[in-house]
Amino acid sequence: GENVEQHPSTLSVQEGDSAVIKCTYSDSASNYFPWYKQELGKRPQLIIDIRSNVGEKKDQRIAVTLNKTAKHFSLHITETQPEDSAVYFCAARDNFGNEKLTFGTGTRLTIIP
Amino acid sequence: DVKVTQSSRYLVKRTGEKVFLECVQDMDHENMFWYRQDPGLGLRLIYFSYDVKMKEKGDIPEGYSVSREKKERFSLILESASTNQTSMYLCASNYLDSIYGYTFGSGTRLTVV
């Protein structure tokens, strides 16, 4: 089955700086890669996703890049703000006709004012 | 707005008890999922279902079973609760072949004593 590794497990950045979280996946057939943000005590929320036919996607201050050859994808947050503090999860979906997501272990991002 | 509702936010059960965790979604989603979330381990898939009365094992099904008698409801059953099942349980759903990610419930924090 799919295996997703996520790094780093914790990340602290100064407000206004950029943050990058990286994930690798094992199954070359995976075709969909979402990122979820989970604020303290709340449910995970989808913030951005990318499909295997696209190399990069942006939405305001967040972007995701995908390198299919190397089987890794990354989340980039620019101009970080205190409200970006949360746990971020990457995930990968296989290509076998179901919607099962395999998640990474999470990154706790702390924005230092 | 899609709603995924988990019946309990917090539960405390005794070792050996049979425990039912309920999840209901109101958007006619075909797919429903149960994950458990543990610090440092991310979200791990227990079971999922893509149709009424259909179920598939996830990555950690041992000690759990599920029931899906109606499309909107997906129940997770701990046949005989054990302390190592103390965790946060998250339900999620989405449409078959959805271009969107999951919608998660708010979670049930289960403590087995």
Image (cartoon, rainbow, N blue to C red):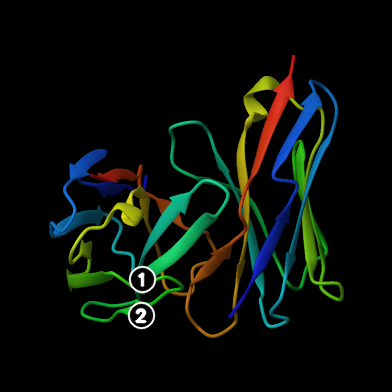
- The location of residue A34, given as percent across then percent down, is 62, 58
Marks 1 and 2 sit apart, C-alpha to C-alpha, by 6 Å
Q: Residue at x 35, y 55 (%)?
A: B84
- The location of residue B104, given as percent across then percent down, is 41, 50
Q: Regarding mark 1 in the picture, which secondary structure is present there?
A: strand
Circle 1 is placed at which residue position? Answer: B47
Relative to the observer, which residue lies in front, B93 or B106?
B106
- The location of residue A83, given as percent across then percent down, is 63, 24
Can residue B8 be seen at all in this image of the molecule? no
- The location of residue B18, given as percent across then percent down, is 13, 60
Circle 2 is placed at which residue position? Answer: B56
Q: Chain of mark 2?
A: B
Both marks 1 and 2 on one chain: yes
Residues at marks 1 and 2 touching, judged by CB atoms closer than 8 Å: yes
Residue type at mark 2?
Answer: Glu
Quadrant (top left/top right/bottom left/bottom right) for the C terminus of chain A: top right
Residue B18 position (above or below residue A88): below
Quadrant (top left/top right/bottom left/bottom right) for the N terminus of chain A: bottom right
Residue type at mark 1?
Answer: Tyr
